[in-house]
Structure formats: structure tokens, C-alpha cells
Image (cartoon, helix red, strand yellow):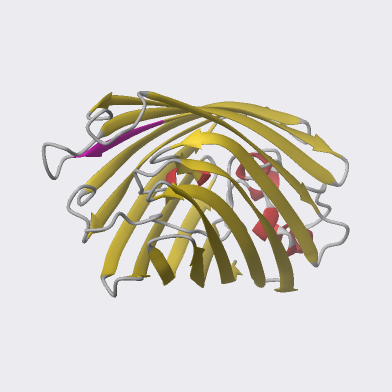
């Protein structure tokens, strides 16, 4: 059975604790309009909002195209929900993936993620789990434990460390590994910039799967908004990685092939005070069947927040 490329793809308009908030809000309507790009930490500053409930419901779908790969094409769809009331936030996501191979074989996978957050004035803690149910026998019933801590100063910076423990227990050849991600994000007037370093360590079976024991890669992002209606995020990464975990644990690259570099660009459009639309394109270079292969992804997301 072929290995699946990824597990969960999630619209980056979803609230992420790794991003700094963009503007300074003047009233509740401003807060609602820009909530799709809001950092959770910023809410702790607005004392009059601490007793409010915030909800986010997002639906997304997309297609995958491959070149020089055993894979031919694919599609995915999913839904995300979050509830926030200071100092607590809960996030959950479910995703369905379907891949077609050039030899006419197919693969299906389901993913479920749950993430809990707790916010102090300058500290953010998180913990969660990501579960994988796949046709692939090697990575079926995969589990990823998520732990993280970050320190932040409102409208200035955040520094954090995330820890992901991946456990694949379906058979004796299934790998076990841990990933550490350190990152720093900085706010500059109307834009945000972030830089991260990732270290992946395999505990077992890396030689049986023709892998190294350790992998490293760096990633960066730039997010900017020139007005209240449109925001743009550009991100890139480079290095070597296998079974990497990203986006706070919601994205698991569930593939034993080595990935080399990639990136994405995303546009988020505010429709009204309670909804937005997002468009995203991403590219990735990876090794498939001892050859350089490419993946292109196109995704559409619709976000509701209230």
C-alpha cells in the first residue's frame, strides 16, 4: 500500500496562537471584522471582552496535483470549530483525504484533532492530540501528542516551543518519533514576521525504512494587511523532514519520503462582520521513488465567526 502525503490541511484563516494580532482594535465591531486574523493572546488585553464567548466554524476543500510521483491526484475536505472564552480555548478539526495513484490504486484517510489552550497575561499553554485512520498499514492508527508553551508581549513579540510526539503502533515496522519546534514572531506596524527551527528525532525503525535518525528544517512566514478586508500570508520552509507536524498539530505530513522544501501563499477576504473567504496555493518538493517529485495544492475555505 502506498504512503499518504499528508493528513490534515487547514485554512490559515483559522486562529493560530503562533501569529501576532495585526491592528489595535477600537471597538467590538472592529474586533469581529478582523477576528479571522486575530491572535488569541490579544484578547486577554481587552478586559471588557474577557466575559464574551467567541466561536469560529470553518469549512474547506481542495485538490492535489503531482508531477514525477507515483501519485496522480487527490482531493480533501474538512471542517474546523473553535470556542474561546478567556482564559480558555478549545479547537477541533476533522478531515477526509482521497488519493489516486498512477497504477489505479486508491487511498483514503480520516483525521481528527483536538487542541486545548490556557492563557495567562504573558504565557500561553496548549495540549492536544491528532489521530489518523488510514488505508496505509504502516501509518494506520497514528497518534500525535501535542504540547506547547509560548511567552508574548502584546502587539510586540511572541517566543515559543512546541513538542510533538508521533506514535504509529499498527505493526512492528511502524516508526516512533519526536519533533521540537522553536519559533519567534515579531509585530511591525501593519505586518508580522515569524521564523522557526524544527528538529525531528526517530526513536526506532528509521534504518529499516531507509531514513536517518535526525532531520532539521527552518520555516518562516510574513503576514500583512493593508486594509480591513484583505490579508495576505506568505510562508516558506527548507531542509529535510519526514513525518513532520505543523500548524499547531493540525497538519501531519504522514509520509516516510523525505521532503526538501516548499511554501504557500494565502489570501483572506472579509465578506462581512461574521464571515470570510480564503484562497490558498502551496507547493512542495519531495523524494518519491528515488526521484524529485512535486506537489501543488489549491484550497478554498469559508469561515464563520461570531
Up the image or down, 206 lies above or below 236; here it is: above
Q: Residue furthest front?
A: 290
Q: Nearer the viewer, residue 116 or 146?
A: 146
- Image spot of residue 70 (x, y percent): 37, 62
Q: Is residue 60 visible?
A: no
- Image spot of residue 233 (x, y percent): 72, 53
Up the image or down, 36 lies above or below 152; here it is: below
| Corner quadrant of residue 276 | bottom right
Asked if residue 125 is among those painted magenta in the image, a careful observer would answer no
Q: Which residue is painted at 88% across and 41% down in the image? A: 189
Q: Which residue is painted at 48% across and 55% down in the image? A: 83
| Corner quadrant of residue 156 | top right
- Image spot of residue 52 (x, y percent): 58, 54
Classified by dominant secondary structure, the portion drawn in magenta counts as: strand
Q: Quadrant of the C terminus?
A: bottom right
- Image spot of residue 234 (x, y percent): 72, 51
Up the image or down, 24 lies above or below 226; here it is: above
Asked if residue 166 is among those painted magenta in the image, a careful observer would answer yes
| Corner quadrant of residue 297 | bottom right
Q: Which residue is painted at 36% across and 69% down in the image? A: 99
Q: Nearer the viewer, residue 294 or 43?
A: 294
- In the image, the segment drawn in magenta is 164-168
Q: Is residue 3 left or right of residue 278?
A: left
Q: Is residue 207 visible?
A: yes
Q: Is residue 122 left or right of residue 256?
A: right
Q: Quadrant of the N terminus?
A: bottom left
Q: Nearer the viewer, residue 190 or 144?
A: 144
Amino acid at each position: 500500500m502506498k504512503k499518504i502525503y499528508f493528513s490534515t490541511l487547514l485554512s490559515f484563516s483559522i486562529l493560530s496562537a503562533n501569529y501576532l494580532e495585526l491592528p489595535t482594535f477600537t471597538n467590538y465591531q472592529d474586533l469581529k471584522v478582523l477576528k479571522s486574523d486575530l491572535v488569541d493572546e490579544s484578547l486577554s488585553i481587552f478586559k471588557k471582552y474577557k466575559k464574551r464567548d467567541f466561536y469560529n466554524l470553518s469549512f474547506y476543500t481542495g485538490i492535489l496535483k503531482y508531477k514525477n510521483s507515483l501519485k496522480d491526484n487527490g482531493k480533501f475536505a474538512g471542517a474546523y470549530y473553535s470556542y474561546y472564552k478567556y482564559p480558555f480555548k478549545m479547537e477541533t478539526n476533522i478531515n477526509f483525504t482521497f488519493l489516486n495513484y498512477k497504477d489505479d490504486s486508491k487511498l483514503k484517510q480520516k483525521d481528527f484533532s483536538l487542541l486545548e489552550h490556557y492563557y495567562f497575561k504573558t504565557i500561553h499553554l496548549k495540549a492536544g492530540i491528532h489521530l489518523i485512520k488510514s488505508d496505509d498499514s504502516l501509518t494506520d492508527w497514528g497518534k500525535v501528542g501535542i504540547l506547547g508553551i509560548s511567552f508574548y508581549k502584546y502587539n510586540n513579540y511572541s517566543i515559543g516551543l512546541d513538542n510533538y510526539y508521533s506514535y504509529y503502533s499498527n505493526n512492528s515496522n511502524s516508526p516512533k518519533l519526536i519533533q521540537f519546534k522553536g519559533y519567534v514572531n515579531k509585530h511591525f506596524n501593519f505586518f508580522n514576521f515569524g521564523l522557526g527551527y524544527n528538529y525531528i528525532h526517530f526513536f526506532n525503525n528509521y534504518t529499516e525504512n531507509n531514513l536517518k535518525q535526525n532531520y532539521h528544517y527552518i520555516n518562516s512566514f510574513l503576514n500583512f494587511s493593508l486594509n480591513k478586508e484583505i490579508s495576505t500570508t506568505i510562508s516558506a520552509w527548507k531542509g529535510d523532514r519526514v513525518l513532520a507536524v505543523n500548524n499547531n498539530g493540525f497538519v501531519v505530513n504522514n509520509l516516510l519520503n523525505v521532503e526538501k522544501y516548499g511554501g504557500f501563499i494565502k489570501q483572506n477576504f472579509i465578506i462581512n462582520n461574521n464571515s470570510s473567504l480564503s484562497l490558498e496555493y502551496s507547493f512542495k518538493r519531495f523524494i518519491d521513488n528515488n526521484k524529485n517529485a512535486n506537489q501543488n495544492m489549491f484550497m478554498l475555505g469559508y469561515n464563520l465567526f461570531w
